[in-house]
Image: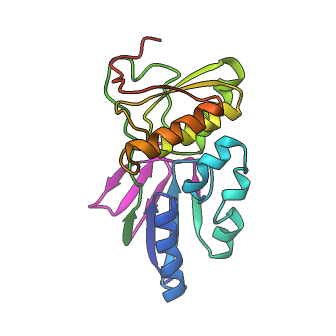
C-alpha cells in the first residue's frame, strides 16, 4: 500500500500543470497525483490559440505536456471530465460522469470564464467565446456553413479572432464601442494606422458602436 499522500488537481491548464511540475521537481515521490480537466486535451499553450485559428499552427503543435508526460510521471489524468462536487468532509471530488477521487490535498486551478456581454440573444446558437480549443473547433465548423462573422470587441483578442475568421474564408466585421482600435494600448493615430492596415486585408469595422442585442 502506497504511503504517498493523494493530491487531486481540478483544472489542467498552464498554471496548474506548471505547479505540478514544480511539485515533482521538489519531491517526485511525495504525492499520488490525479488531475481532472474539462477539455479533451492535455495541457496546451492557450496563448497560441490565435495562430491555431489563423491556420498558422496546429493544435498538436501547442501541446505543452502530452499524454505520455502524465504517464511518465505517474499522474492519473481524467480528460473531458468536469468536476461538479467537492465533498470537503469526506475529502473527495466527483466528476459529472460519476468518477470519484479521494484527496489529502486539493488544488483548484480552473482559471476564469470568458466574459460574454449580457445582452439579449447572447445565449443563442452561433454566439461563441474565444478561450479554448473547443471554441476554435466551433469556429472551424461555422466557417464551413456560414460566410459572415461579427466580432464584438476591437481589442487584441478580437482582432486576432477576426483575422483567423478571414483566413477561414469568412467576411469578418469587428464592432468596437470606442473610436480607436486597441484603445487600451494605442493612441488615435496608431489605432487608425492599424485599422487601415486591417481593412487592406479585408477586415471591416463598425467603430463607436455599442452592441445591444443579438437578433439571430
Give me the residue at 63% from left, 76% from top.
73
Check if residue 88 falls in the magenta segment: yes
**In the image: residue 191, left or right of residue 76:** left
Depth check: give the residue in front, 102 or 133: 133
Using the rendered image of the protein, determine whether residue 69 is visible from the camera's viewpoint. Answer: yes
**Is-magenta flag for residue 57?**
no
Q: At 72% across and 43% down in the image, what residue appears?
A: 55
In this rendering, would 135 be left or right of 122? right
Q: Position of residue 171 (x, y in %)?
A: 63, 23
Q: What percent of the width, then of the height, locates residue 68? A: 71, 67
- Dividing the picture into quadrants, the one containing residue 119 is top left
> Which residue does the image show at 55% across and 55% down from the upper left?
47
| Magenta region | 78-103
Q: Is residue 42 above or below residue 23?
A: above
Q: Residue at x 51, y 41 (%)?
A: 193
Asked whether 10 or 187 is in front, the reply is 187
Q: Position of residue 42 (x, y in %)?
A: 62, 57
Amino acid at each position: 500500500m502506497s504511503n504517498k499522500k493523494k493530491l487531486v488537481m481540478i483544472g489542467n491548464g498552464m498554471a496548474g500543470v506548471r505547479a505540478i511540475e514544480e511539485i515533482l521537481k521538489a519531491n517526485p515521490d511525495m504525492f499520488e497525483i490525479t488531475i481532472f480537466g474539462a477539455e479533451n486535451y492535455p495541457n496546451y499553450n492557450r496563448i497560441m490559440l490565435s495562430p491555431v485559428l489563423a491556420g498558422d499552427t496546429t493544435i498538436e503543435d501547442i501541446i505543452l505536456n502530452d499524454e505520455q508526460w502524465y504517464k511518465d510521471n505517474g499522474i492519473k489524468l481524467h480528460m473531458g471530465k468536469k468536476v461538479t462536487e467537492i465533498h470537503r468532509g469526506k475529502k473527495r471530488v466527483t466528476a459529472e460522469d460519476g468518477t470519484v477521487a479521494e484527496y489529502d490535498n486539493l488544488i483548484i486551478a480552473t482559471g476564469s470564464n470568458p466574459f460574454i456581454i449580457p445582452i439579449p440573444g447572447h445565449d443563442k446558437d452561433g454566439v461563441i467565446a474565444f478561450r479554448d480549443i473547443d471554441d476554435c473547433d466551433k469556429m472551424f465548423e461555422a466557417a464551413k456553413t456560414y460566410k459572415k462573422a461579427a466580432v464584438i470587441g476591437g481589442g487584441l483578442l478580437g482582432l486576432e479572432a477576426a483575422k483567423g475568421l478571414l483566413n477561414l474564408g469568412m467576411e469578418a466585421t469587428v464592432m468596437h464601442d470606442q473610436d480607436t482600435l486597441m484603445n487600451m494600448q494605442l493612441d488615435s493615430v496608431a489605432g487608425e494606422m492599424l485599422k487601415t492596415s486591417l481593412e487592406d486585408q479585408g477586415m471591416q469595422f463598425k467603430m463607436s458602436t455599442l452592441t445591444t442585442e443579438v437578433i439571430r
